[in-house]
């Protein structure tokens, strides 16, 4: 099989997949009788041309960085964590409990507390599937799907029966205390002006960027990261090397679940300032597309999250100004997952043969040898 | 709880179990051939949309000789088949990741159905309510009480049934009066058993899910067998989706499958990939749904079972089964692996 240079594998394959997804999306828009060029310029206008648009784009980006990193870490251990949605939902419960029941003196301390709470709750929700996979061989994909539904039921029960303020109709907690209010981009950068006005982007964005750096350090600069990657490449080799596969499975999933849980800081503490039903809004699933597109590398995840943040905000603008519903973004997301994840080989095989031809043309023909195979 | 109430709950159990059963058998064919199918949900959803949309279209623009409901059913099955084909392309031809392909198909269905529904009908991502000729009617079995008897007696059917003798009550309420797809679904169980365990195709299908290299060595095409399984799965999911939109309800609404594809997947694991057990599992999960629909919270005296627990129970049971505490669930051995011919 002809091999491609590493840069082509990391850049060209996702790029071609994106182009394919974009072409198909444009065809979908054409098919429902709208103009794809107009739609795209509306999206750019709404998401990138105004500071408030950026404020929304970066808010969504923050969510997708966390869930994308969560899926990426699990991918490095060759596990497919579909449970980001449930882990983020339960992470939200952690954030809510910490914000509601601990009297924080200052938001910075509250942020640290909420970070720990969100990560702990998200990790705890990933623990049972991880343990069952490691010890009893039950498939992590199926168990995490089941845990998404169980998480929704748990959250529904807790919000309706336990945390709902007396007399309130909608299933949500009460508003968090003022001391836990996280500085938004407007608070931080506007200086009383109208920059980022009304946009939900907040300091959690920088936590997400830090998380990217931390995951990069973890995966490529620590012993644990090496063990996770080794496990992902060959389970048997890892076992022969004396690494406990049970430990790696569980630890990798705990980190993954913790990262997914962190997303809840942004939505629950940063934006809504109370825990509402369905606060995750499918971000856990978008993490799959983000991780696939970002090739499970933190920097790639960051760029892919930015793209999806743009798509999400742009899609909201489209739904506002045209007859194209927000579900267009779901279609794009599905196409991205399909091309970068499942139909990967369809993009890769032609590219590999192109590179093979180029290499043969550049280097002189090797001396004919007897075929060894 | 009186006899009539029990019968009504069981009756709605049968109705709610039908889409689960069809999807579960679809998954059974697919996974027995070694192709894991997380996309059951998506196939059902796109079929539900297509069947409702075309049943509505043909009821508004009638074509002589073709019942709108049958056109709807046909288009639903075709839509589901198209998704099956895409799954096959990704996971068989291009040897991609079957799990990721299934996830992608679910999102594609969830987005595309609403997008197209909005563009065609402008009702916020749903189809208009189907008129009677666009829906599947209940079939009154011979000797059972049906709407015709109720009209003749000038009283509501439920009252008429409640006054009949118990056997007639069971027959009229529980067994008679369902749409044709319900009977098809239940007949699919022995049919599936027969195909899998009594035909050459079934033997090969099971073999290709356990040891594709052996099937290949015997000179039988692994690719053709797996595509064949996906075609059957596509048809069954199409029926399931069409039943949701045109039998159980009158039209398509967004996300109307509401996780049924995943419950079917759970039932498949619960049944350990066997047809008769699949029937039992689907009836059990259908029963749980029927209870959750009818009663909000169940008061057991000492404590109350919240409705959320009933909603989550199929998933909890599946995790328990998967954990191997109540008999181990062992999937087909080659499930999830794309087959690469050895050189």
Image (cartoon, grey):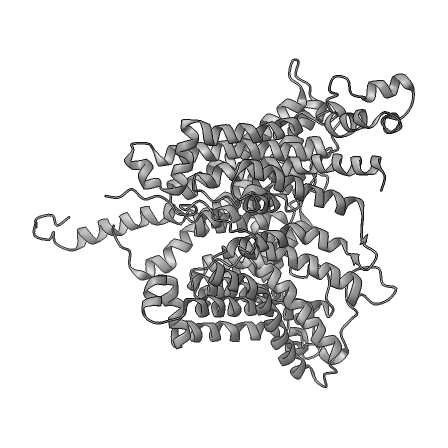
The extreme right residue here reads B154
Whether residue B167 can be seen here:
yes
Question: At 8% from the left edge and 50% from the top edge, which residue is drawn?
Answer: A369
Whether residue B116 can be seen here:
no
Looking at the image, residue A276 sits to the left or right of residue B106; the answer is: right
| Camera-side residue of A101 and B141 | B141
Looking at the image, residue B149 sits to the left or right of residue A353; the answer is: right
Q: Quadrant of the N terminus of chain B?
A: top right
Q: Is residue A32 above or below residue B337?
A: above
Question: At 45% from the left edge and 67% from the top edge, which residue is drawn?
Answer: A246
| Camera-side residue of A369 and B224 | B224
Question: At 56% from the left edge and 29% from the top edge, which residue is drawn?
Answer: B190
| Camera-side residue of A297 and A319 | A297
Residue A59 screen position, x and y as percent: 62, 66
Residue B46 screen position, x and y as percent: 59, 38
Query: Looking at the image, how many numbered discs can be counted on the residues?
Result: 0
Q: Quadrant of the C terminus of chain B?
A: top left
Residue A227 screen position, x and y as percent: 38, 71
Looking at the image, residue A242 sits to the left or right of residue B187; the answer is: left
The extreme top residue here reads B65
Q: Is residue A281 above or below residue B47?
A: below
Q: Is residue B342 above or below residue A265?
A: above
Residue B330 screen position, x and y as percent: 47, 48
Question: At 45% from the left edge and 64% from the top edge, which residue is drawn?
Answer: A300
| Snapshot quadrant of residue B114 | top right
| Snapshot quadrant of residue B80 | top right
Q: Is residue B117 above or below residue A96?
A: above
Looking at the image, residue A180 sits to the left or right of residue A261; the answer is: right
| Camera-side residue of B25 and A69 | B25
């Amino acid at each position: 099989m002809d091999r491609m240079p590493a840069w082509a594998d990391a850049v060209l394959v996702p790029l071609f997949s994106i182009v394919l997804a974009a072409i198909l999306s444009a065809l979908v828009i054409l098919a429902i009788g709208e103009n794809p060029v107009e739609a795209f310029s509306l999206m750019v206008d709404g998401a990138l041309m105004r500071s408030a648009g950026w404020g929304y784009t970066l808010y969504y980006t923050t969510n997708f960085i966390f869930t994308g990193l969560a899926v990426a870490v699990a991918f490095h251990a060759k596990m497919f964590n579909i449970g980001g949605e449930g882990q983020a939902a339960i992470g939200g419960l952690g954030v809510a409990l910490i914000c509601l029941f601990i009297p924080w003196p200052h938001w910075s301390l509250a942020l640290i507390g909420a970070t720990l709470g969100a990560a702990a709750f998200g990790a705890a929700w990933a623990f049972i599937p991880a343990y069952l996979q490691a010890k009893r061989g039950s498939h992590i994909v199926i168990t995490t799907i089941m845990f998404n539904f169980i998480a929704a039921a748990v959250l529904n029960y807790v919000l309706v029966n336990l945390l709902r303020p007396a007399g309130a109709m909608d299933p949500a907690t009460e508003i968090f205390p003022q001391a836990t209010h996280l500085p938004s981009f407007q608070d931080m950068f506007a200086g009383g002006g109208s920059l980022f006005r009304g946009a939900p982007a907040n300091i959690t964005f920088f936590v997400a960027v830090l998380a990217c750096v931390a995951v990069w350090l973890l995966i490529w600069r620590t012993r644990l990261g090496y063990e996770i990657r080794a496990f992902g490449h060959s389970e048997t080799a890892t076992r022969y090397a004396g690494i406990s596969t049970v430990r790696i499975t569980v630890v990798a999933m705990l980190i993954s679940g913790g990262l997914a849980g962190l997303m809840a800081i942004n939505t629950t503490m940063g934006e809504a300032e109370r825990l509402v039903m369905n606060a995750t809004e499918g971000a856990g699933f978008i993490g799959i597309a983000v991780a696939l597109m970002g090739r499970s590398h933190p920097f790639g995840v960051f760029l892919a999250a930015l793209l999806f943040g743009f798509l999400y905000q742009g899609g909201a603008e489209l739904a506002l100004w045209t007859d194209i519903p927000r579900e267009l973004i779901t279609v794009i997301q599905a196409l991205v997952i399909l091309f970068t994840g499942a139909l990967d080989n369809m993009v890769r095989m032609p590219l590999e043969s192109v590179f093979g031809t180029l290499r043969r043309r550049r280097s002189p023909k090797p001396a004919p040898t007897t075929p060894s195979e | 709880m009186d006899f009539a109430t029990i019968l009504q709950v069981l009756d709605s159990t049968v109705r709610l179990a039908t889409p689960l059963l069809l999807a579960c058998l679809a998954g059974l064919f697919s996974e027995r051939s070694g192709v894991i199918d997380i996309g059951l949900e998506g196939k059902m959803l796109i079929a539900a949309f297509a069947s409702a949309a075309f049943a509505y279209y043909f009821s508004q623009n009638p074509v002589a000789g073709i019942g709108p409901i049958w056109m709807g059913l046909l288009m639903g099955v075709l839509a589901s088949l198209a998704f099956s084909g895409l799954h096959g392309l990704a996971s068989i031809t291009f040897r991609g990741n079957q799990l990721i392909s299934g996830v992608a198909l679910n999102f594609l269905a969830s987005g595309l159905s609403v997008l197209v529904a909005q563009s065609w009908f402008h009702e916020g991502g749903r189809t208009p309510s189907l008129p009677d000729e666009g829906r599947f009617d209940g079939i009154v079995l011979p000797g059972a009480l049906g709407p015709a008897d109720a009209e003749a007696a000038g009283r509501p059917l439920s009252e008429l049934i409640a006054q009949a003798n118990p056997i007639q009550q069971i027959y009229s309420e529980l067994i008679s009066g369902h749409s044709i797809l319900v009977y098809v679904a239940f007949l699919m169980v022995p049919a599936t058993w027969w195909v899998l365990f009594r035909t050459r195709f079934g033997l090969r299908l099971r073999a290709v899910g356990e040891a594709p290299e052996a099937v290949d060595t015997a000179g039988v095409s692994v690719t053709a067998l797996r595509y064949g399984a996906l075609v059957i799965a596509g048809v069954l999911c199409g029926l399931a989706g069409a039943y949701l939109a045109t039998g159980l309800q009158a039209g398509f609404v967004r996300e109307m499958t509401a996780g049924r594809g995943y419950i079917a997947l759970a039932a498949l694991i619960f049944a350990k990939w066997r047809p008769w057990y699949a029937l039992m599992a689907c009836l059990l999960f259908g029963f749980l749904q029927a209870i959750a629909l009818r009663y909000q919270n169940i008061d057991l005296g000492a404590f109350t079972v919240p409705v959320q627990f009933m909603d989550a129970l199929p998933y909890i049971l599946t995790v328990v089964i998967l954990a191997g505490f109540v008999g181990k669930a062992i999937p087909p051995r080659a499930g999830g692996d794309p087959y690469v011919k050895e050189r």
